[in-house]
């Protein structure tokens, strides 16, 4: 089978996938500062969970809306561009997330124009500078936890994905996608909380750490399973755009990578 990795359409495909992957990862980091109530959003009565002696309602960061898309994009890149492709876009995303937060902190440090500070008072924001700093100035422990968990999760994901692929070949796309996510997000869900909230200044008790981590993991797995049809749809669209022979050659090249 010919090497199609330098085919113009293949290169454009990788550029599109990498750009979409990085954009979603960046957005997830920056909107993740907002915590939303799932039950209120859906208009249902609060579901009172009780785990490890802790209880509460279903509250998640807004970033959870985008992370499932990142999982799908990881699996698609894994499928067509292999380990090197996933590692490249993961390190690129991590570097650009750091870059984004550096300039967010620079922007916070800039002296605000006096008129701008109160420009949104009529909208219920009496101090625009304080609001800007609160939204974009996420704590360093949270940023560090998210980045470390993201990279560990991505590296585990790519390894598990290819182990399952080696065992199943071209069959069971859903199994390697959900299987790799199940393992990687089990680690990710707890690493981010441990660094940000156990080692960090809040110093969560073990019970709260285990309860919130378990809820986050269940949510991520439910989202990953719900998005399996999207994975197949994207895979089919790429195959149609590249052509069946080129797509097959690319997948085989990725499997050997």
Image (cartoon, rainbow, N blue to C red):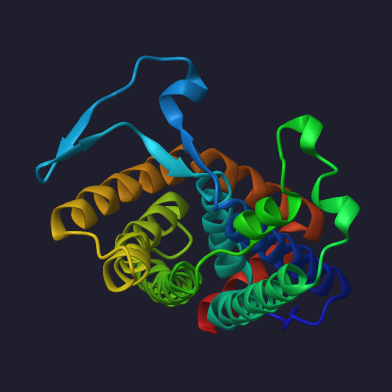
Quadrant where the C terminus sits is bottom right
Horizontal relation, residue 56 to residue 15: left or right: left
Give how far across and how far down residue 103 sits, in percent.
74, 75
Relative vertical location of residue 147 with respect to residue 128 in this rendering, above or below: below
* Residue displayed at 81% across by 54% down: 241
Q: Residue 112, position in %: x, y?
A: 82, 63
Residue, x 65% and y 60% (percent of image)? 133
Residue at image x 29%, y 73%?
Answer: 199
- Residue 254 lies, in percent from the top left, at 58, 76
Relative depth, front residue between 83 and 156? 156
Nearest to the observer: residue 197 or residue 87: 197
**Closest to the observer: 121 or 175?**
121
Task: Indicate left or right for 55 with 123 as reference.
Answer: left
- Residue 145 found in image quarter: bottom left
Q: Pick out the residue farthest to the left.
A: 53
Furthest toward the front, the residue is 114
**Which residue sits at x=23%, y=57%?**
209
Looking at the image, is 228 positioned above or below residue 183?
A: above
Q: Quadrant of the N terminus?
A: bottom right
Q: How many marks?
A: 0
Determine the image quadrant of residue 253.
Answer: bottom right
Q: Position of residue 219 (x, y in %)?
A: 37, 42
């Amino acid at each position: 089978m010919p090497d199609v990795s330098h085919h113009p359409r293949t290169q454009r495909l990788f550029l599109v996938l990498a750009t979409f992957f990085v954009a979603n990862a960046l957005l997830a980091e920056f909107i993740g500062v907002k915590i939303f109530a799932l039950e209120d959003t859906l208009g249902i009565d609060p579901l009172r969970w009780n785990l490890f002696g802790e209880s509460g309602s279903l509250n998640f960061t807004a970033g959870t809306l985008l992370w499932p898309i990142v999982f799908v994009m990881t699996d698609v890149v894994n499928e067509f561009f292999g380990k090197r492709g996933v590692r490249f876009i993961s390190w690129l995303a991590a570097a650009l997330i750091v870059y984004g937060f550096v300039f967010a902190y620079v922007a916070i440090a800039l002296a605000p124009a006096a008129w701008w500070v109160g420009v949104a008072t009529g909208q219920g924001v009496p101090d625009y500078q304080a609001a800007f700093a609160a939204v974009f100035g996420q704590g360093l422990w949270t940023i560090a936890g998210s980045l470390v968990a993201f990279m560990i999760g991505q590296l585990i994901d790519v390894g598990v994905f290819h182990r399952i692929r080696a065992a199943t070949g071209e069959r069971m796309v859903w199994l390697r996608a959900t299987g790799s996510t199940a393992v990687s997000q089990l680690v990710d869900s707890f690493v981010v909380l441990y660094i940000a909230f156990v080692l960090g200044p809040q110093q969560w008790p073990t019970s709260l750490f285990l309860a919130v981590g378990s809820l986050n993991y269940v949510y991520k797995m439910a989202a990953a399973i719900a998005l399996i049809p999207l994975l197949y749809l994207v895979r089919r669209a790429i195959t149609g755009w590249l052509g069946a022979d080129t797509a097959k050659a690319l997948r085989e090249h990725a499997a050997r990578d």
